[in-house]
Image: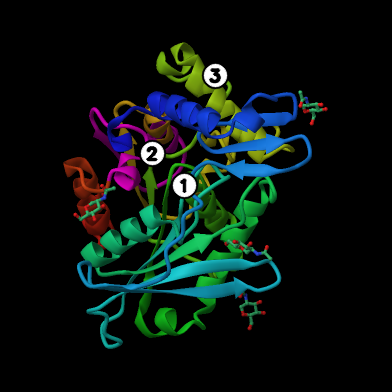
Amino acid sequence: MLFTMSIKTFIFLNLLIFISLSPSISTNTSNILYDIFPFIRVYTDGTIQRFIGTDVVPPSIDPTAGVRSKDIIIGPILNLTARLFLPKTADPGNKIPLLVYFHGGGFFTESASSPSYQTHLNSVVGEANVVAVSVNYRLAPEHPLPIGYEDSWLALKWVFNGTEDWIKNYVDFGRVFVGGDSAGANIAHNMAIRVGLDKTGRVSLNGLFLNCPHFWGKKPIGSGEVSNKQVKSVMENIWVRAYPNTMGFDDPLLNPGLDPNLWRLGCRRVLVYVAGNDILRGRGFYYKEALRKSKWKGVVKVVEAQGEEHDFGVRFPNTTNAIKLVKRFASFLNGGQV
Ligand SMILES: *[C@@H]1O[C@H](CO)[C@@H](O)[C@H](O)[C@H]1NC(C)=O
Ligand SMILES: *[C@@H]1O[C@H](CO)[C@@H](O)[C@H](O)[C@H]1NC(C)=O
Ligand SMILES: *[C@@H]1O[C@H](CO)[C@@H](O)[C@H](O)[C@H]1NC(C)=O
Ligand SMILES: *[C@@H]1O[C@H](CO)[C@@H](O)[C@H](O)[C@H]1NC(C)=O
C-alpha cells in the first residue's frame, strides 16, 4: 500500500503514524531540535530517531538472482564497512566488471544491509554478471558531511588496492563503475570528480550511473522547485543538516553545474535516470546540459521514467519500470549503449 503513494503522502502518513504511536513525544514538541520526515528527528538533548532505513538483513545466497554476498571491514578504526556481491557464474579465468555502489537515504539513513538495497544489488549483480561493493559510508548527523564523501573515497581507493579475495580473483580493473541512487548518486558523482582530480592515477573509472541524483542549487530549475514548497524545504533541510559547514546550496558538491572542475569528471560514460514525478527530475537534465557545455569529453544520457516517483527503482523493485531500470543499468555495466 505504502509503495503506491507519492512522497508527499508518504511523508504525511509517516507523520500521522508517528504521532499516533508516540503521544508522549508528540505532545511536547519543544524538545525537538529539528525534523526531516521521512528521514529523521533530532531532539535538543542530542537523541536521534530514524524513521526509515534501520531494518537490516544479513548477507546471503540468493538462489533467484544467483548471487552471494558477504560483509567486509574496510577501515576498522573508522567503522567503515561494505557488503560485497558475487554472481554464481563468476570464474577467475574470465574477469568481470566491478560496481562500487552508494546507497541513498538523504545522507542520514539506510545501509548496505537494508532489505531494499540487498534486493537491488542482488538484482543488478545477477542481471549484469558483475562484482559489487556496496559501501556503508558513515551517516549524518552523527557523522556530518564531508565524512560520507571521505569514507566513500577511502572505500574506492581500497577497492583498487585489490587485496580482498573476490575483488582480486574476479575483477577486471579496466571496467570499474561507480553508481548510486538519490543521495548515493550525489556521492557517486563526487567520487567521479575526485577520480578526475586524483594525480596518482591509481583509480580509474569506466562509467558513472546516477539514479534520481540528489542535486540542488540556489536558483530553481523548472516550476516544480518553486511551487512544491514542502518538498523544497525538505530538500534544503537535508543539505544544511547533513552538512552544517557547507557553503550553501551552490556548493559544487550539491550543484555540479557550478563546479569549475566538472569537466574533469573521471570517466567517459554517464547514464542518468530520472523519475517523471520527482522534484529532482530537472536536476538530472541540468546535469547533462552542464556536462555538455563543459570541456568534458564523454557521452552522457538521461533516461526518464514517466509517471514514476523519486527512487522508484529501489523503492518499488517489482514494477515494470524498476525492472527496466535494472536491465538498462546492467547493459550499461557491460559496455552497452549509454
Ligand atoms: C517539554 O520539553 C521541554 C524540554 O525537554 C521541558 O523543559 C518541558 O518541561 C516539557 N514540557 C512538558 C509539558 O512536558
Ligand atoms: C558501526 O557501523 C554500524 C552501521 O554500519 C553501526 O550499526 C554500529 O553501531 C557502528 N559501530 C560503532 C562502534 O560506531
Ligand atoms: C592500500 O595499500 C597500501 C599499501 O599496503 C596501504 O598503505 C594503504 O593504506 C591501503 N589503502 C587503503 C585505502 O586500504
Ligand atoms: C517483490 O516480489 C517479491 C517476489 O514475489 C516479494 O517477495 C517482495 O516482497 C516484493 N517486493 C516488494 C517491495 O513489493
Classify mark 2 as within 8 Å of ligand 4 or not, answering yes or no: no
Q: Earlier in the sequence, mark 3 or mark 2?
A: 2
Q: Which residue is mark 2?
A: 212
Image quadrant occupied by the N terminus: top left
User: Counting other residues with Cα less than 10 Å from the Cα at mark 3, is it few (<14), some (14-19), or many (20 or more)?
Assistant: few
Image position, residue 197 (x, y; %) = 59, 55
| 208, above or below 28, in the image | below
**1 and 3 marks in contact (CB < 8 Å):** no
Q: Which residue is mark 1?
A: 104
**What residue lies at 43% left-to-right and 27% top-to-bottom?**
13
Q: CA distance from mark 1 to mark 2?
A: 10 Å
Q: CA distance from mark 3 to mark 2?
A: 19 Å
Please give left or right for residue 150 compared with residue 298 in the image. right
Res. 279 visible in picture: no
**3 and 2 marks in contact (CB < 8 Å):** no
What residue type is disc 2 on?
Cys
- Badge number at residue 219: 3
Q: Which residues are magenta?
A: 288-316
**1 and 2 marks in contact (CB < 8 Å):** yes
Q: Secondary structure at mark 2?
A: loop
- State the residue lying farthest toward the bottom: 93
Please give left or right for residue 192 compared with residue 334 in the image. right
Q: Nearer the viewer, mark 3 or mark 2?
A: 2
Q: Nearer the viewer, mark 1 or mark 2?
A: 1
Q: Secondary structure at mark 1?
A: loop
